[in-house]
Image (cartoon, rainbow, N blue to C red):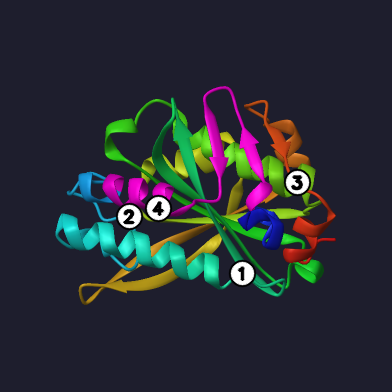
């Protein structure tokens, strides 16, 4: 089995409505389908690299290949876990958790997207709460980080609901104009004070932690 060689594939995060897991090839194909169907309102671009502006078939291929690269690049000094979110047996989106030199920084960054048909039901908050439980409860983190482009109200709302506080800004260039990216930081204490979902963390053994520099 794949998990015999890559123990992080044993990790399962379970909430009231969702299971988060690292994807197999069938999961990646389903995720590509969600990308092709659309992941946000076309009137606002929430991604700095604007990958969703491609045609559906290209969006799907981009999503599939990008996440294969993330899985192939797992290393204790630099990793990104592209969890798929599964609801009622169907992949509905993805939730990333990424870190550099986690053994020293004790912090990681979250990012996500959700198939547009599943917006407005609190699933984005539930997805992020799941990886925050993995991070703080399972990996003994001190901080979680996130960011959102100015105007991305849903992402900012999730951060505020889960206890993040504003942590400065960055500037990006999109179609020859400057856009503002807002940084968010969550402490362990604020996470404990804003728990919104019960999360079961399964399969996080010593070997899986070692792959993430957290053994």
Coordinates of residue 81 in the picture (x, y in percent): 57, 58
Q: Work out which quarter of the rendered image holds the N terminus and state it.
A: bottom right
* Residue position for label 4: 28
Q: Are marks 3 and 1 in contact (CB under 8 Å)?
A: no
Q: Work out which quarter of the rendered image holds the C terminus and state it.
A: bottom right
| Image vertical order of residue 172 relative to residue 167, above or below | below
| Image vertical order of residue 203 relative to residue 141, above or below | above
State the SS at label 2.
loop
Coordinates of residue 102 in the picture (x, y in percent): 74, 67
* Residue position for label 2: 46
| Image vertical order of residue 3 relative to residue 128, above or below | below
Which residue does the image show at 78% across and 46% down from the upper left? Answer: 138
State the SS at label 3.
helix
- Cα separation, mark 4 vs mark 2, equals 22 Å
Coordinates of residue 29 in the picture (x, y in percent): 34, 51
User: In the visual, does 15 lie left or right of 138?
Assistant: left
Mark 2 crowdedness (10 Å alpha carbons): few <14, some 14-19, many ≥20: many
State the SS at label 4.
helix
User: In the visual, does 23 lie left or right of 60?
Assistant: right
Magenta-colored span:
9-34
| Image vertical order of residue 167 relative to residue 94, above or below | below
Front-most of residues 9 and 129:
9
- Which tag, 4 or 1, sits closer to the chain's start? 4
Front-most of residues 185 and 66:
66
* Residue position for label 1: 74
- Cα separation, mark 3 vs mark 2, equals 27 Å
Residue 13 colored in magenta in the image: yes
- Residue 136, labelled with which disc? 3
């Amino acid at each position: 089995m794949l998990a015999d060689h890559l123990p992080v594939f044993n990790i399962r995060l379970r909430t009231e409505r969702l299971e988060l897991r690292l994807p197999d090839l069938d999961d990646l194909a389903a995720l590509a389908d969600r990308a092709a169907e659309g992941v946000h309102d076309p009137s606002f671009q929430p991604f700095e690299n604007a990958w969703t502006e491609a045609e559906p078939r290209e969006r799907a291929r981009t999503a599939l290949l990008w996440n294969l690269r993330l899985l192939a690049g797992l290393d204790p000094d630099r990793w990104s876990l592209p969890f798929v979110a599964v609801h009622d047996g169907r992949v509905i989106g993805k939730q990333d958790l990424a870190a550099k030199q986690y053994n020293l920084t004790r912090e990681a960054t979250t990012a996500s997207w959700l198939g547009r048909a599943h917006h407005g039901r609190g699933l984005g908050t539930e997805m992020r709460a799941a990886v925050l439980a993995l991070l703080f409860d399972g990996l003994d983190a001190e901080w979680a980080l996130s960011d959102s482009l100015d105007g991305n109200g849903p992402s900012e709302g999730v951060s505020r609901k889960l206890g993040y506080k504003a942590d400065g800004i960055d500037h990006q260039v999109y179609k020859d104009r400057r856009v503002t990216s807002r940084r968010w930081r969550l402490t362990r204490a604020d996470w404990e004070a804003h728990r919104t979902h019960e999360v079961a963390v399964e399969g996080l053994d010593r070997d899986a932690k070692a792959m993430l520099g957290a053994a």
